[in-house]
Image: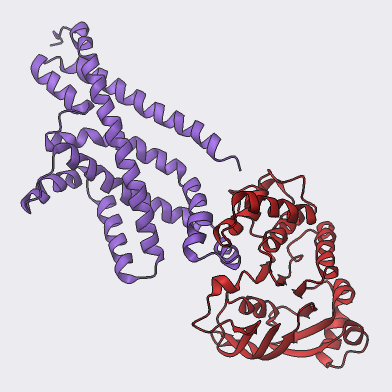
Chain colours: A red, B purple
């Protein structure tokens, strides 16, 4: 379970998270929507401790992310994150990309890591690209590789930060399909996205962020069909 | 005026000794590069550490190495340290002097190379649970060494040529030293130094060429 309690966060004078409260139970697929600068991406990087917070706390399975005593490297093994920019490691083959952290962090043997990497890459449809370097892949393929790389660490939670925003439109579908597949397998996921149709389809709940505040959270049919928050109504009208 | 008689045969008879000298030159250059690269990586980590003291050490090293003559650096290792009672052989002084110079230039090259690697690479590595050290060693450093590969090759060429500065510390077993001693005995100055120059040229060409082949093998991405 991910518990976010009254989290505040500023970049200089700009407060990007103004007291967020949110609980995500295991198995839930939560999507987060909202305009740019609404704080939704920042929240994700705070959840796995890549960004410090100013006040409040975030608990993952009861472990406080920003406590000094927390071993962040260990905690991050539980929480996979995939970014808008896929960040393939260019000097490693696709297989090696997915093996690296398994060997270095989880201390798996090369054989074990290789087998797991192959399994995950097949899972995301890259079984025929194992020995290729990332520069030979399309953006969509690189993004799927990044997803496999995170999944190979056997995380309990997956965070997706606008993973389709940097892709050419014709490549968005293959990545969303991968996310749909994970959702159907019961993975606990928080997806920050601009893909409304996708959000409506896969989510258990959808949260709308506006100017650092979680203005509304509800099951998708309720949030999309009967939005209460005036800003959300405006946002939905603009994106349709 | 031009009544110099070339005696190439006499000079060519000394070729085996000169080639032995060339081996010493290669040895010093290779060792100085190995030390130089290791130290340069350390200096790079010092600069990244955010620790002011370590950072100052690295900056001072780089500044001195790049802004004073290599000849002074070698001279200081030999005679400067000698003043403190540390007496090094000409071989060691030359090796350490060149390694000092290499490390300074390479650390600067590495810094430039690092700028070309996006921060998001480190972030991606950290998000997979890698420590900052693991992220640097496994993700950043290999890319840095690739970007800096050409400057490293240039520095290796410089290292070969810098061995001739061993003259100031009475080094007499490297290519320059051997040639110089042969010259002192035979006075076939032009012939001997022309042959030495050709050997230097062939050495540096061989380095450039093998670096290119090595790069093609190493960097397939």
Q: At x 90% / y 74%, what residue is drawn? A: A201
Q: Is residue B100 left or right of residue A36?
A: left
Q: Residue B48's x, y, as percent?
A: 41, 64
Q: Residue A82's x, y, as percent?
A: 69, 66
Res A106 quadrant in image? bottom right
Q: Is residue B27 left or right of residue A126?
A: left
A69 above or below A193? below
Task: Work out which quarter of the rendered image holds the N terminus of chain B and state it.
Answer: top left
Q: At x 29% / y 65%, what residue is drawn? A: B56
Q: Residue B20's x, y, as percent?
A: 24, 22
Q: At x 35% / y 70%, what residue is drawn? A: B51
Q: Residue A44's x, y, as percent?
A: 67, 77
B7 above or below A176? above
Closest to the observer, A59 or B191: A59
Closest to the observer, A1 or B92: A1
B166 above or below A171? above
Residue B56 can be seen, yes or no: yes
């Amino acid at each position: 379970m991910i518990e976010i309690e009254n989290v505040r966060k500023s970049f200089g004078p700009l407060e990007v998270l103004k007291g967020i409260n949110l609980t995500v139970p295991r198995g839930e697929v939560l999507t987060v929507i909202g305009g740019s600068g609404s704080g939704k991406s920042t929240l994700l990087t705070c959840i796995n401790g890549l960004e410090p917070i100013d006040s409040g706390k975030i608990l993952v399975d009861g472990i406080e992310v920003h406590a000094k005593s927390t071993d962040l490297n260990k905690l991050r093994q539980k929480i996979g994150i995939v970014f808008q920019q896929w960040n393939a490691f260019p000097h490693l083959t696709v297989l090696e990309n997915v093996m690296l952290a398994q060997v270095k962090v989880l201390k798996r043997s090369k054989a074990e890591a290789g087998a797991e990497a192959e399994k995950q890459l097949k899972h995301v449809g890259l079984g025929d690209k194992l020995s290729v370097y990332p520069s030979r892949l399309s953006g969509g393929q690189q993004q799927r590789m990044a997803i496999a790389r995170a999944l190979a660490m056997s995380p309990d939670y997956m965070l997706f930060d606008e993973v389709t925003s940097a892709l050419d439109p014709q490549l968005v579908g293959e990545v969303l399909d991968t996310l749909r597949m994970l959702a159907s397998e019961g993975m606990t996921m928080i997806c920050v996205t601009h893909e409304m149709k996708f959000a409506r389809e896969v989510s258990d709940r959808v949260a709308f962020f506006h100017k650092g505040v979680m203005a509304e959270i509800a099951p998708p049919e309720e949030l999309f069909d009967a939005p209460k928050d005036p800003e959300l109504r405006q946002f939905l009208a603009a994106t349709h | 005026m031009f009544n110099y008689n070339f005696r190439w045969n006499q000079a060519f008879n000394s070729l085996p000794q000169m080639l032995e000298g060339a081996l010493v030159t290669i040895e010093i250059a290779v060792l100085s590069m190995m030390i130089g690269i290791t130290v340069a990586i350390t200096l790079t980590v010092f600069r990244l550490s955010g620790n002011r003291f370590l950072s100052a050490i690295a900056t001072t090293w780089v500044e001195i190495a790049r802004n004073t003559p290599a000849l002074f650096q070698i001279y200081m290792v030999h005679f400067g340290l000698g003043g403190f009672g540390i007496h090094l052989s000409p071989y060691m002084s030359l090796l350490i002097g060149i390694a000092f110079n290499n490390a300074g230039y390479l650390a600067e090259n590495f810094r430039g190379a690092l700028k070309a690697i996006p921060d998001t690479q480190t972030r991606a590595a950290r998000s997979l649970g890698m420590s900052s050290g693991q992220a640097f060693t496994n993700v950043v450093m290999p890319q840095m060494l690739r970007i800096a590969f050409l400057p490293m090759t240039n520095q290796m060429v410089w290292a070969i040529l810098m061995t001739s500065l061993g003259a100031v510390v009475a080094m007499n077993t490297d290519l320059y030293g051997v040639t110089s001693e042969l010259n002192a005995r035979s006075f076939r100055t032009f012939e001997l130094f022309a042959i030495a120059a050709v050997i230097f040229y062939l050495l540096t060409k061989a380095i450039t060429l093998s670096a290119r082949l090595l790069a093609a093998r190493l960097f397939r991405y």
